[in-house]
Image (cartoon, rainbow, N blue to C red):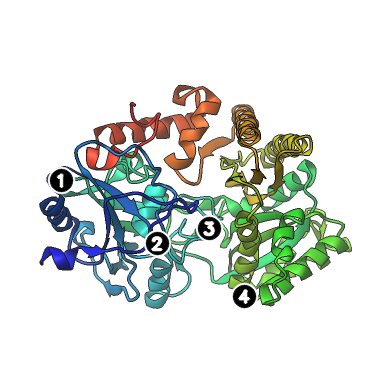
Amino acid sequence: MTSRKLLKTLNSQIVDGENNAVVCQQAYAIDQGNLVEVINALKTRYGPEIFLLPLSATSGGGGIFQRAAPQGGAIIGLQFTPTAHPAVSCARGHATVDTGLDQIVIDRDNHYIYAGAAITLDQLTQALAAELGPRYKVLGADLTSYSYAQVGATFMTGGMGPQRRYFSDSISEIALFDGAEVKTIGGDDLSHYAGTYGWTGIVCAVRCRFQKMPGNEIAFALPVNNTPAKLGKLLQHLAPYCFLQASTADVQNSHGQPAVILGIEHITTNAMAPMFAQGVDNIITRRAHQLAQKCTDANADGLVFVNGFVDTDIDEFLFQLVDNPDIEPLSIADINLEHSEIFKDPEQMRAVREAVPFAARTQAPAGRFIYKGHTDATIRLNIDSVESSMQRLWQSNEAYVSAVSDYFDCQPRVRGQILVYGHMNPYGVDPHNRLTFASDEQQAFTEAVDHVHRLRDQFLVALQDLCLNSGSEFIGGEKGAGSEHEMFDAFGGPDHAPAALKQKFKKQYQAIQSASPMFNWRALPPYIEC
C-alpha cells in the first residue's frame, strides 16, 4: 500500500478537551493498513526519529498535555478514523493481533469480543446486541462518551462511567504497538499499561469479556436530601444490588440474585440552574422541570438517577426495595415512593441525567481569565460499612464545597461557583463538584487557582483518611494518569498515596520509563524523570 493511501492528512485545526490548539508538525487520519506500515511511511517522510501524538476521534483529547517539543524529530499527530460500518463476524479462537482497525469479532463460546482501535464503545455494545441480544454487555463500557469513545483510547485513558468500573478491567488482552512492533499483552501485565494515556504505546485492538445481564433494563429517579445521613442511608439500602458477582457468565448481585444496579447518578437542584437558564424547550428539559418539581413536592434538594437490570418488571423491583410494605406511605430509605419517577425509556433518563452536567461544564463565564475543573476521586465504599463511610465522605465533601463557596463570597475580583453532582454508586462514589470561575485580573486569578487547589488537596487527604479508617478503597481518578498525576502532590508524592493508587503508579511507572521516546516524551511527572 502506498504512503499516500496510508497517510490521510487532517486539515482541520486540532484542539484539546479545553479548546486549546494542539501543536504538531502534521496530523494524519488512519483507517486502514497496520501501524507498522504507517510508522515506516512516516519515517520515510520525516526521518528516522519521530514523536507520536495520539489524537481522539473528536479532538486532541484530554490526554495530550502540551509538553516542550523534543529535539531532533517531528511531532506527528495520529488519529484512528471512526468507522461508520464495522466489519462484524463470529469466530472461535480469534487472535487479538489479527483484528483489523474497523473489525469486531465475537467468540460466543468463550464470551470474548475483539475490537479494533477504531471501534467505539457504542459499536461494541450494538454488535453484541445484534448478534446475541441486548442482555449481553461488556462491563464498564457505559462512559457518557460511549458514542464516540474508541476502545483502544478508552483503555489508555482509564475512562469509567456510572458503573464506576474501568473499561480496562473488562479487557483480557490487547495488541499494542510499542514503537517497533505490535505485541500481545495480557494478564497482570495489562495493569502496567491501562490508564497511561498512550505514554507507553498505541493500542491496535482489544479482547473484552462480555456477560449476560438479567432480562429487564430499568431506570428511575428518586428525590433526595443532600445530607450525610440521608445519602448514607440510601446507599446502604441499595448497596447489595451495586456490588456484583461478575466472575461468571451471568451477572448477579452480591446476594447471588438476578437484580443489579449499574449506576446511581446524583445531581443537586442547584446544579440544574445552568440548563434551565439556557431557556431551551424540548422533551428533555421538560422532563427535567418535572423532576425539579418533584424535588419541591418532596422537600428535597437533589435527585439520584438509578439504572440497572432485573428479572422482574420495574414495579415489582421497586416494591422489593420498599422499607416496610405494611406501612403507608411506602418508602425507599425513607423516601416517599410516590415521588419516584419511572422512565420507560432508559435512554431518555440518560439524556436528562447528562444534560445537567453538560450545561454546567459548558458555561462561558465572563472574564479575561477563566478556570474550569472538577474534583475527580473515586472511592469504593466498604460493603460492610456503606452507611457510615458515605456519611463521613459527604461530610468531607460538604466542608470542601463550603470552603470554596466562602472563598468566592469574599473575593470581589473573582466570580465563581461550585455545583455539586457526580457518581454515587457505592462501588465507586465520585462527587464531581464542578468548579467554574473567572477574573479580569491576572493576580486575582492566579491566587484563586492556588487557593482552590489547596482546598482540593485538603479534600483528597480527607478522603484518604476516610479509606484508612473505614476499610474503603481509594481507586483513583476516572482519567487514569491524567487525573492522578495531580493527586500525588496532595499526598506528598506517590510513596504516600493510598495503597491502591500507589500500587497502580508503580506498575505504570515501570512501563512508562521503559517505553519508546516515540510515546513517553509526553509523560508528566512523577511518571517520568524530568
Q: Residue at x 74, y 59 (%)?
A: 273
Disc 1 target residue: 180
**In the rendered view, would you say 283 is above or below 472?**
below
Q: Quadrant of the C terminus?
A: top left
Disc 4 target residue: 345
Amino acid beneath label 1: Ala
Q: CA distance from mark 2 to mark 4?
A: 23 Å
Instruction: Evaluate if marks 2 and 4 touch, with contact meaning CB atoms under 8 Å apart.
Output: no
Amino acid beneath label 3: Gln
Q: Residue at x 39, y 65 (%)?
A: 120
Q: CA distance from mark 2 to mark 1?
A: 31 Å
Residue 197 picture location, percent across and down? 37, 45
Amino acid beneath label 4: Asp
Q: Earlier in the sequence, mark 3 or mark 1?
A: 1
Secondary structure at badge 2 equals loop
Q: Earlier in the sequence, mark 4 or mark 3?
A: 3
Q: Earlier in the sequence, mark 1 or mark 4?
A: 1
Disc 3 target residue: 252
**Mark 2, other Cα within 10 Å: few <14 / some 14–19 / many ≥20:** many
Disc 2 target residue: 210
**Mark 1, other Cα within 10 Å: few <14 / some 14–19 / many ≥20:** few
